[in-house]
Amino acid sequence: MNKAPRYLLTDQFDIGMLASLTANISLTEISLDEVCHLIEEAECEKQLGLHGGWADAVNSRLAASLVAQGPILLVARPVETDQGTVMKWARVEIGV
């Protein structure tokens, strides 16, 4: 049985996408280590049949739909720092 992924990894996200939503929105900065841990957990949970694991929305261009109880977005954004460009990660979850 094909289940929807629990997490979508993407770099295509605009904060303006949240403006039209009336649901509870959780936007949390997370580390790359946390992203890796979530992906590992998602793979284990997929094997248990709990959900569809995770999907790379960057390469497959899955629609990162922002709907209540939908996939949790793990968003990568390049940020300029004194040390050069680094990737910052955010977890975006839409509740009810």
Image: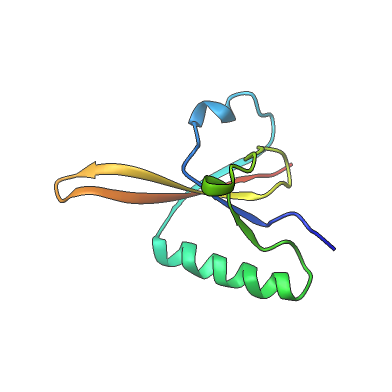
Residue 13 position within the rendered picture, expressed as x and y whole percent measured from the top left? 50, 36
Marker count (numbered):
0
Residue drawn at (63%, 43%), measured in percent from left and top?
62
Residue 70 position within the rendered picture, expressed as x and y whole percent measured from the top left? 71, 46
Above or below for 93 versus 13: below
Left or right of residue 22: residue 34: left
Left or right of residue 57: residue 44: right
Left or right of residue 42: residue 31: left
Where on the picture, by quarter, is residue 1?
A: bottom right
Above or below for 91 versus 14: below
Residue drawn at (48%, 67%), measured in percent from left and top?
36
View extreme (right): residue: 1
Residue 85 position within the rendered picture, expressed as x and y whole percent measured from the top left? 24, 46
Residue 93 position within the rendered picture, expressed as x and y whole percent measured from the top left? 61, 47
View extreme (left): residue: 82
Q: Quadrant of the C terminus?
A: top right
Residue drawn at (51%, 70%), measured in percent from left and top?
37
View extreme (front): residue: 60
Residue drawn at (69%, 35%), measured in percent from left and top?
23
Give the colour scheme shown: rainbow
